[in-house]
Image (cartoon, rainbow, N blue to C red):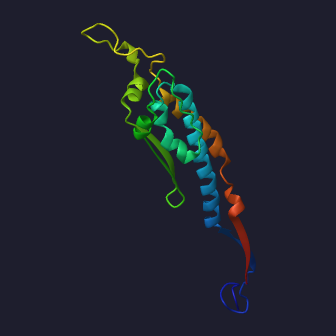
Amino acid sequence: MGSGFGWGKDAVHLKAKLRVPRIDLAGYKAALHEKLSEALAQAGCKWLYTVDEIIPTWSGASRATLSPLASYVGYSLVIGVMSTAPNRIDVGIAHGSATFEGNQDTGLYSFSYATTLPWLIVNEYNNANTFINPKTGQPYFHLTHPGPYHFQQAAAKALRAYLAAELEGLPDVRKYITTRTVSIG
């Protein structure tokens, strides 16, 4: 006499078909890397475009500090020199630095820009024309386009707006999921 449970003649036998998901993680990471690398380069271009619109041209030095980042992201940076100014493009290039990293393994995608150009730093935060020589009572500078530029703040705002829109279109992980049917019993 069996109870319907156990291994006797009255045992219950089940049959099932299960769908087992598989994720092509390498494929998804490659697609994500391609998308994020392109988005990072475009973000760098948006950042540079905003800065390029703000920093005025005189000797070329201030804009030339952007050269390292422009070369990383493929941005066509136009550096001009006013006819009344000395050519300081090489000075600017020497005072600018940048990094650009898109690492699929770590998931880190970033770029940076830095400058040590003294007058660009001063003009970023100040109107240099207001700096008065205490001995003469006259301004030290007579800039046609004085600061403050606030280019970092404006470029960061443009960058955030671009990335918010761009990153909504990340690769759909569902394209990298496949299923396999497994029969039991």
Check the image and report above or below for 173 versus 144. Answer: below
What residue is drawn where x is 71% and y is 68%? 178
Name the residue nearer the viewer: 83 or 13.
83
* Residue 127 x %, y %: 41, 17
* Number of numbered discs: 0
Asked if residue 97 lies left or right of residue 21, the reply is: left
Pick the quarter of the image with the C terminus. bottom right
Residue sitting farthest toward the left: 135
Q: Quadrant of residue 181?
A: bottom right
* Residue 155 x %, y %: 53, 32
* Residue 132 x %, y %: 31, 12
Check the image and report above or below for 112 versus 183. Answer: above
What residue is drawn where x is 36% and y is 30%? 118
Pick the quarter of the image with the N terminus. bottom right
Check the image and report above or below for 5 versus 102. Answer: below
Name the residue nearer the viewer: 37 or 66.
66
* Residue 183 x %, y %: 74, 80
Asked if residue 127 lies left or right of residue 49, the reply is: left
What residue is drawn where x is 65% and y is 40%? 165
Name the residue nearer the viewer: 14 or 11.
14
Q: In which quarter of the image is residue 157?
A: top right
Residue sitting farthest toward the top: 137
Q: In which quarter of the image is residue 177?
A: bottom right
Name the residue nearer the viewer: 102 or 132.
132
Check the image and report above or below for 167 versus 89. Answer: below
What residue is drawn where x is 73% and y is 74%? 180
